[in-house]
Image (cartoon, rainbow, N blue to C red):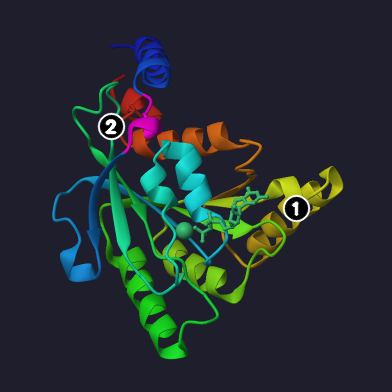
Amino acid sequence: MTVKDCKQALKESIIKNMMSKKYNFKQAQFFITVNDLASLPQQSIKEIAVCGRSNAGKSSLLNRLTNQTRLAFTSKTPGRTQHINYFSISNTSDNSAADTFLVDLPGYGYAKVPEKIRAHWVGLLSDYLISRPQLVGLVLIMDSRHPLKELDYTMLRFFSSTGKPIHIVLSKSDKLNNQEKTAVLHLVKSTLHDDGFTNFSVQLFSAPKRQGIEDVESVLNSWLYSESSISDKECLHDK
Ligand SMILES: Nc1nc2c(ncn2[C@@H]2O[C@H](COP(=O)(O)OP(=O)(O)O)[C@@H](O)[C@H]2O)c(=O)[nH]1
Ligand SMILES: [Mg+2]
């Protein structure tokens, strides 16, 4: 195979992936709830985790992404029920061969939870973020009016040590005017850049206005397909 042929094959495979093998997040199905790290699924199935401070808008984003009302369930004592919810997703139209998990991590930082319990959960979350080989990327949700709180930084630091990508979703963008939207995007990007973070992306999101959902889908798809496409390197080896 010549380099030209290989590049053509690469192009075709990327287009094919984009056209036909998109993950169908709308068909996400509830899989399991776990309360501790020892009970995490054993399967070597790719995972994408979603985390954020309590009230940042995680359930609203997951609802928009998956159309699952079960995800909307909010506890009467938020921040106390600390479950990790697994949802299976697939790139087949009928979800018949689920090969990825969307992992809904517990919200952190809820003020009324005793400090000891909060610290315990931050410890569990960071253990999961650092040591889970199945994890391919982290979606971190922050209220666009209150970005980059201390615990967000804690999560960012732990996860960025793995070298895996982080996608930051700035929620409730409908509460901002255009100038404020531009400003918060710039603030988050430049602050993280100055702090030495590299493998991250940032977007705005509004659940009621349904703005930004395609951007989230396209980032998640790029993570899920990044390993399966042929690389330029392989093409050159094939000369
Ligand atoms: N205006 C607006 N409100 C939102 C948005 N996302 C979430 N909310 C509201 O913020 C509150 C917390 O949202 P929720 O999704 O339950 O947050 P969670 O605790 O992170 O799961 C709820 O009252 C939501 O209706 C958004 O994009 N725009
Ligand atoms: Mg929630």
Q: Is residue 146 above or below residue 9?
A: below
Task: Report x, y in % for residue 59.
Answer: 48, 52
Q: Residues within 10 Å of mark 2 (few under 14, many from 20)?
A: many
Quadrant (top left, top right, bottom left, bottom right) of the N terminus: top left
**Relative to 117, is 231 above or below?**
above
Percent x, y of residue 46 = 27, 45
Residue 133 coordinates in the image, percent (x, y): 26, 57
At horizontal 31% and vertical 61% (from top left) the residue drawn is 84
Q: Which residues are magenta?
A: 22-28
For the C terminus, the quadrant is top left
Which of these two is toward me, 109 or 224?
109
140 up-or-down from 128: above or below: above
Q: Which residue is mark 1?
A: 186
User: Residue 30 — which label?
Assistant: none
Question: Which of the two residues, 164 or 137, is positioned nearer the viewer here?
Answer: 137
* Residue 166 in view: no
* Residue position for label 2: 90
Q: Position of residue 202 (x, y in %)?
A: 61, 48
Residue found 30% across the figure and 31% down from its top: 228
Q: Earlier in the sequence, mark 2 or mark 1?
A: 2
Q: Residues within 10 Å of mark 1 (few under 14, many from 20)?
A: few
